[in-house]
Image (tube, rainbow, N blue to C red):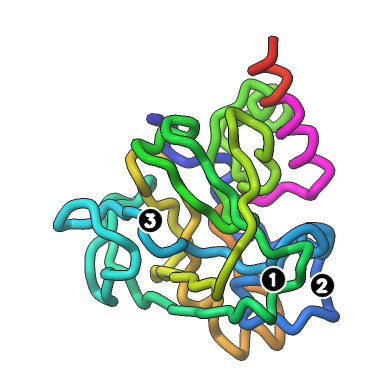
Amino acid sequence: MTHPKPFGLQANAGTQSRASDVAAISAAMMKDAELYSLALREDGLLPGTLVATGTGWRKIETLQAGEMVLTFDNGMQPVTRVHDLTIPQHALPAHKAFTMVVPQGVLGNRRQIDMLPLQEIIIESDFAEERYGDPFVLIQALMLEGFEGIRRVPISGDLRVFMPTFEQEQLIHTCGMALLTARAESDFSPLDACTQGPEREYMRLPLSDLSALAASLKQQRAA
């Protein structure tokens, strides 16, 4: 990928609808209420996920604040903090107790990746280019179920999640060329959580558009 600014990079893209009845751990987890109904609201990286750093590929659980991580748009950037969250298995709603498995090579990943359902990924799509004027677009792992073998796997124990943050939202390289979103540390401000949602660097699509995008990818692959 050589596109300089994936899909609608802008300083003021916080246009998502809010789920007022959801007690989010932080504003970073506030997403479309329709998506909340389908999966856990959390995003972030699961243990074992490899991240490109200034010292080579590292498992996310070994990353520390201040270390340099390779981003898509801004080169090497220091990690502000790595939030470490554990969700007990008994606290997981039965219909949301799953992760997504992405087979090797599907997203440019050199090894299989396990992802949270609402973790956002950057993909390239002819449909997106025709409809939005940009071939690169963010989509949640959940929406790609059935594409190239991407599938759900039940969670069998407590769920541990690592959320690396930066001064501003970034796309980071994981497990090769897979590009995943990482939040701005300001997303975790209690003040922001109580007032307005955090500004996003990258534009988000509503569920209806995400569904159409996912369908187009599957149809294109089947053709």
* Viewport quadrant of the C terminus: top right
Report the side of 163 relative to 130 (left or right): left
The secondary element bearing badge 1 is classed as loop
Which numbered disc covers residue 19?
A: 2
Query: Which amino acid, by three-letter code, is at mark 3?
Result: Thr
> Where residue 80 appears, x then y in whole percent?
35, 75
> Residues under labels 3 and 1: Cα distance?
23 Å
Residue at left offset 58%, top offset 79%: 87
**Up/down of 129 relative to 31, above or below:** above
Residue labelled with disc 1: 30
Residue 39 placement, left or right of 88: right
What range is drawn magenta here? 203-216
Residue 16 can be seen in this image? no
* Residue 150 in the image: above or below residue 156: above
Q: Position of residue 213 (x, y in %)?
A: 72, 33
In x, y percent, where is residue 56?
A: 18, 52
Q: Are marks 2 and 3 in contact (CB under 8 Å)?
A: no
Specify few, some or many for label 2: CA neighbours under 10 Å numbering under 14, 14-19, or 20 or more.
Answer: some
Q: Main secondary structure of the magenta part?
A: helix
The residue beneath circle 3 is 49
Q: Where in the figure is residue 185, as x and y percent of width and height? A: 46, 76
Q: Nearer the viewer, mark 2 or mark 3?
A: 3
Callout 1 crowding tier (Cα within 10 Å): few <14, some 14–19, many ≥20: many
**Outermost residue, left direction?**
55
- Please tell me whether residue 83 belongs to the stretch shown in magenta: no
The residue under label 1 is which amino acid type?
A: Met
Q: CA distance from mark 2 to mark 3?
A: 29 Å
Q: Earlier in the sequence, mark 2 or mark 3?
A: 2
Q: Residue furthest front?
A: 156
Q: Residue at x 28, y 69 (%)?
A: 63
